[in-house]
């Protein structure tokens, strides 16, 4: 109960996902201030810097440092959560550009290596897809349905999808579908931050 009081429990985006946990929200609500002016949570500040500030080749060491900090926070939750610590493997969501390793995929790999767990990197049949943040909420799931695949045999394994930000859950749902097709027994997701944006109009 102690760890559940510190994290955000997110509704499952599909029948293929047993449950979803986020470390925190993306923003801290401030009474009397417009929501667009709410400050980032500490967790989302790490993510925002890693994704949008230190992404150039010369910034690799700064991005790695932020990723290690975030992976450490995720690992601490895994240690305390009675279900998360039972998973066998870590899986990552395909980035929108196959030529670049996304921050979310780097995060999943860092967590897997730190815990001595196998890492399965799912792939997308489209080498480039529009970033989810640029796709209307209601279109996100239909745009990617059936495009992800798992290159490994994960028959009978429990897989934990690790990502940086959870918005509508469309990429987690599609990754989980691919893992289940590849034989996964159980799939759940752990992410850094949950957006405050409503998912009411997402399928």
Image: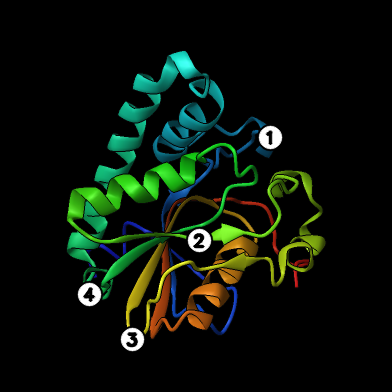
Quarter of the image with the C terminus in it: bottom right
Query: In the image, residue 38 lies at what x, y percent?
Result: 59, 34
Label 2, secondary structure: give it.
loop
Judge left or right: residue 116 versus residue 172.
left
Labels 1, 2: front one: 2
Q: Which residue is mark 2?
A: 122
Q: Which residue is mark 3?
A: 156
Q: Quadrant of residue 62?
A: top left
Residue shown at the point (61%, 65%) measured from the top left: 148
Q: Is residue 192 visible?
A: yes
Q: Earlier in the sequence, mark 1 or mark 2?
A: 1
Do the CB atoms of the residues marked 1 and 2 lie less than 8 Å apart? no
Residue 140 position (above or below residue 186): above
Indicate which disc residue 86 carries. 4
Q: Earlier in the sequence, mark 4 or mark 2?
A: 4
Q: Is residue 34 visible?
A: no
In three-dimensional space, the C-alpha distance between marks 1 and 4, rounded to whole angstroms, equals 38 Å
Query: In the image, residue 164 lies at what x, y percent?
Result: 47, 47
Q: Earlier in the sequence, mark 3 or mark 1?
A: 1
How crowded pointer 2 is (Cα within 10 Å; few <14, some 14-19, many 20+) is rated as many
Q: Which residue is mark 1?
A: 36
């Amino acid at each position: 109960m102690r760890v559940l009081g510190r994290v955000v429990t997110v509704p499952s985006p599909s029948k293929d996902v047993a449950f979803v946990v986020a470390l925190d929200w993306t923003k801290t609500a401030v009474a009397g201030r417009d929501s667009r002016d709410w400050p980032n949570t500490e967790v989302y500040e790490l993510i925002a810097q890693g994704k949008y500030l230190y992404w150039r080749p010369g910034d690799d060491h700064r991005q790695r440092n932020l990723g290690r900090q975030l992976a450490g926070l995720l690992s601490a939750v895994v240690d305390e959560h009675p279900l998360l610590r039972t998973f066998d493997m870590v899986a990552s969501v395909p980035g929108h550009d196959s030529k670049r390793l996304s921050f979310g995929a780097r995060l999943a790999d860092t967590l897997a290596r730190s815990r001595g767990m196998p890492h399965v990197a799912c792939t997308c049949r489209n080498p480039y897809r529009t970033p989810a943040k640029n796709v209307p909420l209601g279109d996100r799931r239909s745009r990617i349905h059936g495009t992800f695949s798992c290159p490994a045999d994960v028959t009978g394994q429990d897989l934990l999808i690790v990502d940086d930000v959870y918005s509508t859950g469309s990429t987690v749902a599609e990754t989980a579908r691919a893992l289940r097709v590849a034989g996964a027994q159980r799939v759940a997701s752990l992410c850094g931050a949950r957006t405050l944006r409503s998912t009411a109009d997402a399928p």
